[in-house]
Image (spheres, coloured by chain):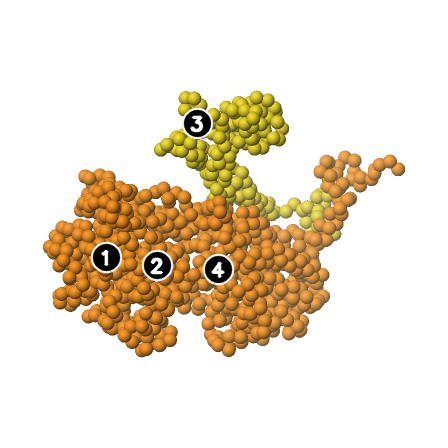
Amino acid sequence: MDRDTDSGVPEDAGFAPRIFHWFDQRTGIRDFARKVLDEHIPGGARFAYVFGSGLLFIFLLQAVTGVSLALYYTPTAETAHTSVAYITKQVAGGAFLRSLHSYGSSAMIIVLVLHFLQTFLYGSFKGRRELLWLSGALLSFLVLGMGFTGYLLPWDQKAYFATAVGTNIMGQTPLIGNLLTRLVRGGDTIGTLTLSRFYVAHVFLIPATIFMFIGAHILLFRKAGPAGPVKEHPITPKLPPEHFYPRQVLMDMAFVLLIMASLAGLSYFHPTTLGPIANPADTHFLPRPEWYYLPMFEWLKFWEGPYVVVGVMALPGLLAMVFFLMPFLDRRLERSPWRRPIPVLAVAFVFLGMIFLGIKSRIDDRLSPDIAAQLDLQEQQEKAYSAAPFEPYLESQDGMGAVVSSAAVADPQLSIGKGVFTTRGCVACHGSSGMGTAAAPSLVGVTHKFAESDLIALLHNPSPKMRVGRMPAVDAPPAEMSALVSYLGVLGTSAANVTPTYISPSSPTTAGVKQNVSFARDANQSTGGVRQTVLAPISASAASGQQLFQERACFACHGPAGAGGRAPALAPFVAKLSNTQIVNLLHDPDSKMRAGGMPPVEASPEQIAALISYLRSLPLQEPGRLAAPEHRLSNAMVRQDAHPTDSVLVATNSSPAMLKDNAIPAMVADSGGKPAMPLVPAPNPGRQLYVGRGCIACHGPKAEGTRIAPSLIGISDRFPGDKLSYLLHHPTDKMRDGGMPAVTVNDEQMAELIAYLSSLK
Amino acid sequence: MTYPVDTNEGVIECAQCAAKDPTLVTRRSILGTILGIASSSMGAILGASMLRYVLYPVYAKDTGKQWSHIGNVGEFSNSKEPVTKEITFSVRDGWREVISTQSVYVSRAANGQFQVLSAICPHMGCSVGWQASQGKFVCPCHGGQFAPDGSHLAGPPPRGLDNLRTQVKDGKLQVQFEYFRTNVPDQESLS
């Protein structure tokens, strides 16, 4: 009784069989493998049966890629987005793995539908397979849950808003709706607790449940045995069986290979994008769910008021019940779909109906110009953000983090470029952060599309398509152009949050000003007839005069930098007049000015003096050349995005959302001892909006109306309630013909504006 | 249907064999082999991607060296012994950039040359303190001792305190902080 001498293999057997036998004696693996592969498939192996294995493969793929993502992902509201950006933009193979995971979730749904359709049409759920069907139905809901919880984790705009909508829908459940929503959100709003809950559900709870039910599903399947082809009896199969191994295994592998190749190809050539970080204050964002939720999304549009419960809860609930209880509803052993017309037709109706709803929602989105424009803008922003370089999350010593690029502090070109972007009126159509408005597209990432020289050429000579969109030629000297291009290069990143530096391409005025200046590089260079000038800083008073010029929207008619537009260029005028004459004209425009729509300029004497000083600093144009072509008023500055231009310094009553993007213009210290002048803050935020958005230009300084646009006094009585705000957001055709643009403000600003208008007598 | 089966008795034609023992390998088609190769290459793609992905931080280059501000040159003109100064610099830590703080020792030679020493002991990484009463640096962990100019006097450390690169810009002393390998005789940067 010394040693274990039984080997069970012949003495001359090779090394590998001996090892395998040693192992098998201790684990019984050979018998186990035999049982696993000894699955009898009545009627033989078929490609129709591959979908179940396909699902198993995709689940494993998702688990593996998911664990990889979890190596770098952080589930907190502060850092989730940055960590996903890190994965996508920095980590080797990160974009590929993330795309596999993202497309894999869509693939899961597709193969799930195929599996359902195949097993349903073949009647493979009949004959003591009720529990098998139930476990499968439960698995499909768990998979949908994975899709929903995973969608929030990147914490970008679409993730946030889609989850807001989804959790609101949960709130429609009778009795417990409110509690359910707050439970899922971890509070009243979507925040870091929501993210933690969704993360735990997505990584631990649902996968564990799926894992258990996959096990149950396979065991139940093996107990009942494969149902085989349609003609086969569901309980006692008669057709000669074939083993799972090898042919069905090979077919399953072929399908899996197809899935893997498609996912890999898609992920490599068309990786998933990441949009900009969630901004709950954004009132423009249009959320859209993932494609497999679009039918539900469209379905919900038909239900309003008290019927919402019917459409959202009752009917889908009924559908789900039918889905679950299918084997109990049709108890006949008949498997042929031709002889089960009612169930087959019902499923066909629901399935085709869902496809129809999904397609219809896409068509509806395309048909509505506002929605299509906003969705296009969102897509553009997402692409731009994905193309932009990675910005790390900056943690400062006091623990307050922010995503800020430290490089931006060092580069004066960006400040100058931003100044150019603002003073040339680019913000009017392209938005204050260059992200685009309804009037003009986003410029984020434009420097990736065009080399610097090409971009400058394009700005000097816009393409026909750009001209159709009212893009003027940007007539600036080379130094300004290159600063502008530097700034365009950082749009969409935190480096764009610099303080703009305003410069005027005129002869130097007061000396001794400390500011970063750039000089025209090559005096001999000529690009389309642009004058070569030395850039110099302007005096303190001219700088604040320039701010007034911006704030009062003078450029709406007089063009950017007063170079002319609907109203004449200002430099030639002021050159001919004395200061007193100009002051009088500004306070009390003559008949010719009034006929053109010029309102009196209400400002303090210091402000007027500053304005005059600015106007005198403007360069005289060469005869016959306007800096900017004449604009239709509707396309001039008025089409701004939700964030006011940088020159609105008077932000005392502003909501935090407005302040966020406000860069306070640089106050330049005058060496002559005169202190920099702050602007007198306007007392009324609605008035600020009225002036700042240029309403004043057409509707008059007291909204009394001008030749161009009617009086607004009493407007809130004529359009009570939400009508006025709707009208401002969506001007009628008649209004548009007169040049009225859509007023893009958030709800708080709209309320302030309407309050101001209501106060007018 | 019968097909050839490899057994220990040689190749036999067997109709029932597969039904009894499916683990017996049959001489199957090229298709199976192709499928096997294709599947393994798919697996390899996934595996290679994952390997690169997991190893990324191991081989990623850290952010470039930066200059940290210590103080004005004038501050150090009268110091007879090393002065402790705290410097801050940003470190890239995964997806975030953190401001890290470290202590350094600043001394000035008679000819005005600055010397900035890292306070991290080159033995095991403990923080070395300056003992004014003894006129030398003493490491509290294993008793390593260093002269005021950082050179090794006694104890287990294999080299002296590490010298850091300095520069003077606009009258301000700046240092480039780096981490060095511990327990080796030569100063090797870890960045």
Q: Give the mark nearest the N terminus, 1 or 4.
A: 4
Q: Residues within 10 Å of mark 2 (few under 14, many from 20)?
A: some
Q: Give the mark nearest the N terminus, 2 or 4.
A: 4
- Chain for numbered disc 4: A
In the image, residue A748 above or below residue A512: below
Q: Do labels 2 and 1 share a chain?
A: yes
- The amino acid on which the numbered mark 3 sits, given as a three-letter code, is Asn
The residue labelled by disc 3 is B78
How far apart are the two marked residues, 1 and 3, measured between alpha carbons? 54 Å
Look at the numbered discs 1 and 4 and tell me whether their residues touch, using CB distance below 8 Å: no
How far apart are the two marked residues, 3 and 2, measured between alpha carbons? 50 Å
| Residue at 43% in and 27% down | B78
Q: In this orientation, which residue lies closer to the viewer: A364 or A227?
A: A364
In the image, residue B68 above or below residue A665: above
The residue labelled by disc 2 is A651
- The amino acid on which the numbered mark 1 sits, given as a three-letter code, is Gln
Nearest to viewer (mark 1 / mark 4): 1
